Image (spheres, rainbow, N blue to C red):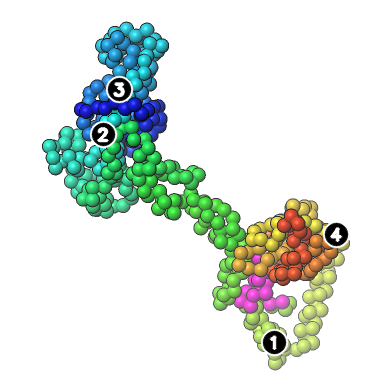
Amino acid sequence: TRMVPSCVPPSLALGSSFDGVPPSRQTSPDGAGAGAGVGSSSSGGARPPGWIDPDLLEVKSKACICALCKGLLVKPTSGCRRGCSFCRICYRGHLLQRKDCPTCSSPVADEKNLVHNRPLEDMIAELNMRCSKDAMENGEDEAAEAGPPAAKRAKLEPAASMTVQALRKELRQRGLKTPGTKPELVARLEEDRKQGAGCKWKGRVGGLAAHLLECQWVPVKCPNEGCTESPPRKDLAEHEATCGMRKVKCAHCEGQMEHQLLAEHEGSCTLAKVECPNEGCSVLHMRGAMNLHREKCEHEEVACSCPGCDARLLRKDMDAHFEATHLGPGVSAVKLLQSAYDRIAALQAVAESEQGNLSPAPTTWVFNWRADGWKTGHFSSEPHSFGGGVTGQCVLLVNANDSPFVGFEFKGIDRGRVHATFSIIDKHDKTLRHEMEEEDDCTDVFFVGRDFTPTAEDKAQSVRADGSIRLRAVVRLFLDAAA
């Protein structure tokens, strides 16, 4: 082997953490190694950082191999009178157990006797080698020449006769995708073998560290937080584009989340526009305020308001039903009026019997709160307790492609009625615009409010120096005593 000393400091990273281990000798992601795994040698010793397989050298030299880790010497160090050299980290580990030379057994007092063999290090840096990700490591090129060792010939086993586990192992070593059926894996491996896949770099040992920083076949950890994949550098961009852990924005509320959670989020996003669930109605409305549309939807099924009538029809058909059934030929207006009086009398009787259970006159609550401008998002005030387990808060829902919804969200209502006024306050604390809304039948979780489209002038007058806006809600809630 021709080894030329170099007066230039070697670029071999002493104690650096680049990966010089060929894939065929690495431990696979599932823990099944194809040879001595990373971090261990064939003799069971620990490998130093920057360990390089001697098989990657163009011409092997026994003088350049550490007898302890079986790899190319990394920061060669001598300690005995004969000058036997080993990797510095290997030698130090040996001296913790025995105070002698691992090769000639000459006594070595302690670590202070160790000497850095720089001439040998410079010579090693000048040796020619190939990249650890070269396809030759699998024996393709050597098989056509003098015949590879038995261990390498085994890697050239016909793909069709290999097990699925073996197929996936070799595909993984080549930096290829492993999902698929056995026929798909066989076809993928045979095609890659024909192409001679792998890094074709050849250079000096001293240049390996710099090459591995650019090598397209070196596994690179995905930068997305939470992702454990390490695809080859050449496939990193493709992986990032489909990685389930990449951060994406909801098209409706613009909230950020992992891509794998996007579908679930969009299925419940309150700002997403969804189609009315009533058959025959194709109106799109924000999910969070769909109840407001359904209160007026012509395709909503409702009960007839006439006392004693149990009919349930679509809202659009209710007028025709009332005219035909309750005001049609043969129907006595006097009888209908009498029925209504009877119903009123019955309700008065119930009211008198429950007089003690009715709540006093409702109190008016005024909520002054702020939101972060008219930008897309879901903004709300601090929750307020109305007593009896009933809570509520002001809300402003701004969809990226829809007009804002200003309203009030109630939770825990057993039964009640709401009257509310919503106002936009300008920069001088004066009312800029206001809307009123009233709901007679509020239960459980309930929204009351309406869509509000601000004009350019509204935005100019309402947005303050810090980018926020001020809103006011005046709410009157009528609850029965049980609520």
Q: Residue at x 71, y 69 (%)?
A: 456
The residue that disc 1 covers is 323
The residue that disc 3 covers is 120
Which mark, by number, is residue 363?
Answer: 4
Q: Residues within 10 Å of mark 1 (few under 14, many from 20)?
A: few
Residue range corresponding to the magenta coloring: 287-305
Q: Residues within 10 Å of mark 3 (few under 14, many from 20)?
A: many
Which-is-in-front pick, marks 4 and 3?
Answer: 3
Q: Who comes first in sequence, dot 4 or dot 2?
A: 2
Q: Residue at x 84, y 64 (%)?
A: 430
Q: Residue at x 58, y 62 (%)?
A: 252
Q: Position of residue 436 (x, y in %)?
A: 78, 69
Q: Who comes first in sequence, dot 1 or dot 2?
A: 2
Q: Quadrant of residue 351?
A: bottom right
The residue that disc 2 covers is 128
SS state under label 2 = strand
Q: Amino acid at mark 1?
A: Glu
